[in-house]
Amino acid sequence: MAQIDAYVPPNSDVGTPRWPSMNTRLLAKPAIWTLRGLTYGVVLVVAYIVVDIVWKGAPVLSWEFISGFPARGGTEGGILPAIVGTLCLVLGTTIVVLPLGMACAVYLSEYARPGRFSNLVRLAIVTLAGTPSIVFGLFGLGLFVLFLNFGSSILSGCLTLACMVLPTIIVASEEALRSVPVSLREGSLALGATKWQTISRNVLPYALPGMATGAILGIGRAAGETAPILLTVAAFYLPRLPRSIFDQVMALPYHLYILATQQPDLEKVRPLQYGTAFVLLLIVLSVNLVAVSLRTHFRKKYPW
């Protein structure tokens, strides 16, 4: 069969590359330099904060500081109860929020029918994701502490933190699920697989890197929050370790807040402030490193 070439009118510019005009290139340079300057500015500010905390907090770290109990209202001694309390809150929040958030994301992405109701649900989730943390603290105080009579306890704090990070995890997990190509779903269904088999074996494995990253970063945010635990679980001074989920605990964010605002002699407790901030920074950094490691592992296991 003879090949029929497309007709190209004479003096046509089809196939000729169009280079940006001189005015466009002149306007692009200031925009690029502005964006670059803003990026470098943000990086420098973050680097200054981190370096300042590490420089002044690292000399405070010692085995006595990490493993000791606070004394004299928290102005002396160690921060072991605050570290254990923070880890308990992070672990409890993870247990509550991970299955709930990922299940909601799977339903919204794979089962919910497009319509007004699903749009309203997504709007409510996005709105809750931007709600100030103190609002969740008041919500936890009213529902878990007072109405359900859990009291000021680890259980109340974990449930409150779970409510706070749940919208973020749902949004991140749903976006990860939507990034999986539709062809994987259609191919699986065409071969006779059920809806759940398609989701569990063809969709979730490839969406897990994004889902795990979003979930763990949300939990890392919960580790550094003060307002929600201020009203639901945090104790001002409690030099002992928790014995059950209905106990109050000290937490690093609230302990740091107390050292910075409630002590008359700020210069005396200044080293403790930087040491506590450094330990909290290490915990949040460890959570973020876990997220990066999981994302790398799943991407190697399920490459596109």
Image: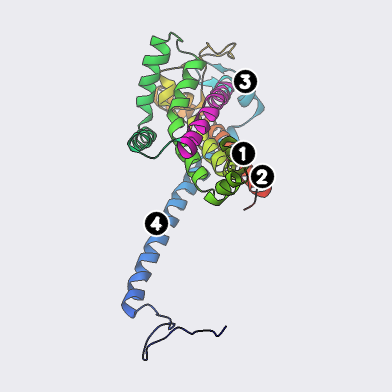
Between 155 and 266, the one nearer to me in the picture? 155
* Mark toward the viewer: 4 or 3: 4
Residue pointed to by mark 4: 38
Q: Left or right? Give the position of 187 relative to 7.
A: right
- Disc 4 marks a residue whose amino acid type is Leu
Report which quarter residue 208 is drawn in. top right
* Mark toward the viewer: 3 or 2: 2
Residue pointed to by mark 1: 290
Between 264 and 10, the one nearer to me in the picture? 10
Residue pointed to by mark 2: 297
Residue occupying the point 49% across, 48% down? 47
- Residue 257 coordinates in the image, percent (x, y): 43, 26
- Find out whether the residues at labels 1 and 3 contact each other: C-beta distance under 8 Å: no
| Cα distance in 3D space between marks 4 and 2 | 33 Å
- Disc 2 marks a residue whose amino acid type is His
Residue 94 is inside the magenta segment: yes
Q: Secondary structure at mark 3?
A: loop
